[in-house]
């Protein structure tokens, strides 16, 4: 069976960086160290939900602290597991692009199903670009559905 083809991401600096190499933050102690590092390096971050419009400005310190608390709470919903696997960094020592997935709805991060699973949030030092809206799924009309069952 042929896998469905995923549409390409936009050809912009941001989305090319998004598709670059990333490493997962697996150990909970490393997740905690990342949260602490982010709290200390809280300036100049864009927080982006790929399902909404990209922000025009980075978060200020107060908004970043609020965002970070929400991210910690989300990732910690699976704290009982031996490893996290919900966070990916472009640079393990000094990240500039961070993918934070919903640990409950991650799907297949390697897109083995043919469906691209987007992170819940993307933290970036680079201004993000909007994702184009997906093409609407056309449903067959009544007779098309009926004919498909024959």
Image: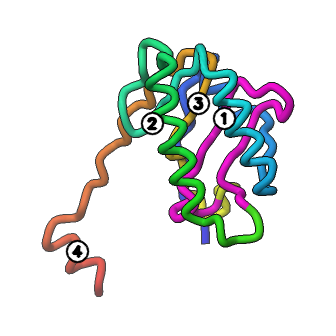
> Callout 1: 10 Å neighbours few (<14), some, many (20+)?
many
Badges 3 and 1: C-beta atoms under 8 Å apart? yes
- Any mark on residue 133, and which? none
Inspect this view and state whether residue 48 appears. Answer: yes
The residues tagged by marks 2 and 3 sit, at their Cα atoms, a distance apart of 9 Å
Instruction: Provide the secondary structure element on which disc 4 rests.
Output: helix
> In the figure, is residue 122 to the left or right of 131?
right
Instruction: Provide the secondary structure element on which disc 2 rests.
Output: loop
Which residue is nearer to you in this view: 55 or 29? 29
Q: Provide the residue designation for mark 3.
A: 123
> Callout 3: 10 Å neighbours few (<14), some, many (20+)?
many
Magenta span contains residue 47: no
Q: Height in image: 73 above or below 44?
A: below
Q: How many marks?
A: 4
Region in magenta: 84-108
Q: Height in image: 86 above or below 112?
A: above
């Amino acid at each position: 069976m042929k896998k469905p083809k995923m549409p390409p991401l936009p050809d912009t600096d941001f989305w090319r960086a998004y598709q670059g190499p990333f490493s997962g933050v697996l150990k909970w102690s490393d997740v905690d160290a990342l949260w602490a590092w982010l709290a200390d390096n809280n300036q100049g971050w864009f927080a982006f939900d790929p399902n909404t419009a990209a922000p025009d400005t980075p978060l200020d310190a107060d908004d970043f602290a609020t965002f970070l608390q929400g991210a910690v709470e989300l990732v910690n919903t699976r704290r009982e597991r031996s490893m996290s696997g919900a966070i990916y960094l472009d640079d393990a020592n000094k990240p500039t692009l961070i993918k934070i997935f919903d640990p409950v709805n991650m799907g297949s991060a390697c897109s083995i199903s043919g469906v691209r699973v987007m992170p819940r949030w993307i933290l970036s030092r680079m201004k993000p670009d909007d994702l184009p809206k997906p093409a609407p799924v056309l449903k067959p009309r009544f007779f098309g559905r009926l004919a498909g069952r024959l």
